Image (tube, helix red, strand yellow):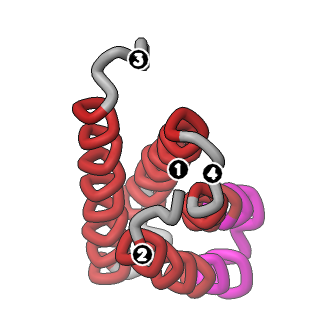
């Protein structure tokens, strides 16, 4: 499966934003625990989507998208923690949340398309 090029590109750009957020949290705020979690989950979204491009079956592709969505949910949670604990400026957290929500919507839409195109498979 070649995957959705726009989704992969957006996730890559989001990973770059995650790296910037990591630098702020890790080096300026000296928060090593949350910054490490955000880095891991945020970058894993794009990693999973990149891997999905070479999936050998529809099920494998679906699985990788599901993993990416789980990482996106986790990242969204972490960004909300950062926002609500005031570790970064409000504007930074708002941009990050909006970008993460857009990624989640795109992934969810791709998952729905797969589910509709392969109704005989039991996805749950």
Q: What stretch is highlighted in magenta?
A: 22-39
Bin the neighbour count of mark 2 within 10 Å (Cα to Cα): few under 14, some 14-19, many 20 and up: few
Check residue 55 in the rendering and tell me which mark sits there, or answer none. 4
Q: Which sits earlier in the primary sequence, circle 2 or circle 4?
A: 2
Are the residues tagged 2 and 3 within 8 Å (C-beta)? no
Name the residue: 45% across, 80% down.
9
Q: Characterize the magenta stretch by its predominant secondary structure.
A: helix
Front: mark 4 or 1: 4
88 to 50, vertically: above or below? below
The residue that disc 3 covers is 121
Check residue 68 in the rendering and tell me which mark sits there, or answer none. 1
Are the residues tagged 4 and 3 within 8 Å (C-beta)? no
Q: Exactly how many numbered labels are in the figure?
A: 4
Disc 4 is placed on an element classified as loop
**Quarter of the image that includes the C terminus:** top left
**Image x and y of residue 19, in percent:** 62, 82
Bin the neighbour count of mark 4 within 10 Å (Cα to Cα): few under 14, some 14-19, many 20 and up: some
Q: Which sits earlier in the primary sequence, circle 4 or circle 1?
A: 4
Does 112 sit left or right of 24 as displayed? left
Disc 2 is placed on an element classified as helix
Q: Which sits earlier in the primary sequence, circle 2 or circle 3?
A: 2
Front: mark 3 or 1: 3
Would you say residue 33 sits in the magenta stretch? yes
The residue that disc 2 covers is 5
Are the residues tagged 4 and 1 within 8 Å (C-beta)? no
**Image x and y of residue 119, in percent:** 28, 21
The part of the image, by quadrant, that contains residue 37 is bottom right
């Amino acid at each position: 499966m070649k995957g959705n090029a726009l989704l992969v590109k957006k996730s890559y750009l989001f990973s770059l934003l995650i790296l910037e957020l990591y630098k702020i949290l890790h080096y300026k705020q000296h928060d090593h625990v949350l910054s490490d979690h955000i880095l891991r989950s945020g970058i894993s979204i794009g990693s999973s989507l990149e891997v999905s491009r070479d999936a050998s079956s529809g099920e494998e592709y679906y699985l990788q998208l599901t993993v990416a969505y789980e990482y996106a949910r986790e990242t969204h949670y972490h960004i909300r923690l950062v926002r609500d604990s005031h570790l970064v400026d409000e504007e930074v957290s708002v941009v990050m949340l909006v970008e993460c929500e857009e990624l989640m919507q795109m992934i969810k839409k791709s998952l729905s398309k797969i589910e509709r195109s392969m109704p005989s498979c039991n996805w749950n």
